[in-house]
């Protein structure tokens, strides 16, 4: 028997959550940002068996232009995670090998964007913080939030969404069709759902 007041799971989100084994109701599957974080946090783990399956679905989603922002959000979260160089997480190269051709283009676009943000930050002369404190977080939920919103550079310093927003506000080019300013506004509850 179907309970009428219960919300039916959203298609793409529920599909990804099901693949990684997240039970209905434990995550708001109507919140794309939350779904992308949770799924990326799971599939980034070296021992997770469904990484290739999730990335195949992501590739399939890119057949529809309307899914582009969702996919870029997911791939950026996943990419941020793998930059931390933690043994428990897959490397960027391992993930890159599992991407389909459209996903690989998105992956490379996100990589180029963050390289531009890092270059801009260096030119500002404002020193970057070390990623060490970020990587030492013990609370699993806080770790997921911080690790998906920040990336570790090869220097051991970190960049985060605040840096991306500042870069875009300073006139830097956002990822085509995807703005970190819009994402930040959505997180703050001021943008479109």
Image (cartoon, helix red, strand yellow):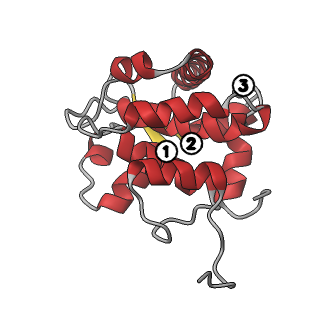
Does 111 sit left or right of 135 as displayed? right
Residue located 62% across and 36% down the image = 71
Q: Secondary structure at mark 3?
A: loop
Do the numbered discs 2 and 1 sit on residues whose CB atoms are within 8 Å? yes
Which is nearer the N-term, disc 3 or disc 2? 2
Residue located 36% across and 31% down the image = 82
Q: Which mark is residue 149?
A: 1
Q: Dot 2 surroundings within 10 Å: few (below 14), some, or many (20 or more)?
A: some
Figure check: 20 above or below 44 = below
Q: Dot 3 surroundings within 10 Å: few (below 14), some, or many (20 or more)?
A: some
Do the numbered discs 3 and 1 sit on residues whose CB atoms are within 8 Å? no
Residue located 44% across and 47% down the image = 19
Q: Position of residue 189 (x, y in %)?
A: 71, 64
| Residue 147 at least partly seen | no
In three-dimensional space, the C-alpha distance between marks 2 and 1, rounded to whole angstroms, equals 6 Å
Does 185 sit left or right of 23 as displayed? right
Q: Position of residue 87 (x, y in %)?
A: 19, 32
Q: Which residue is mark 3?
A: 172
Q: Secondary structure at mark 1?
A: helix
Q: Which mark is residue 161?
A: 2
Q: Position of residue 160 (x, y in %)?
A: 50, 40
Does 136 sit left or right of 173 as displayed? left
The one nearer the camera, 89 or 150, is 89
In three-dimensional space, the C-alpha distance between marks 3 and 2, rounded to whole angstroms, equals 14 Å
User: Which image quadrant: the N terminus?
Assistant: bottom right
The one nearer the camera, 136 or 106, is 106
């Amino acid at each position: 028997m179907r309970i009428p007041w219960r919300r039916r799971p959203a298609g793409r989100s529920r599909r990804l959550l099901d693949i990684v084994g997240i039970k209905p109701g434990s995550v708001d599957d109507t919140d794309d940002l939350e779904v992308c974080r949770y799924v990326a946090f799971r599939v980034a783990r070296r021992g997770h068996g469904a990484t290739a399956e999730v990335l195949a679905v992501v590739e399939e989603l890119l057949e529809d232009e309307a899914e582009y922002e969702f996919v870029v959000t997911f791939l950026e979260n996943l990419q941020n995670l793998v930059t931390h160089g933690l043994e428990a997480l897959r490397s960027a190269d391992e993930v890159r090998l599992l991407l389909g051709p459209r996903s690989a283009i998105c992956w490379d676009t996100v990589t180029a964007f963050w390289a531009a943000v890092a270059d801009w930050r260096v030119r500002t002369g404002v020193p970057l913080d070390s990623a060490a404190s970020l990587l030492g977080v013990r609370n699993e939920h806080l770790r997921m939030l911080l690790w998906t919103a920040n990336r570790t550079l090869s220097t051991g310093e970190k960049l985060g969404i605040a840096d991306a927003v500042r870069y875009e506000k300073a006139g830097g080019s956002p990822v085509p069709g995807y703005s970190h300013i819009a994402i930040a506004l959505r997180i703050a509850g001021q943008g479109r759902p």
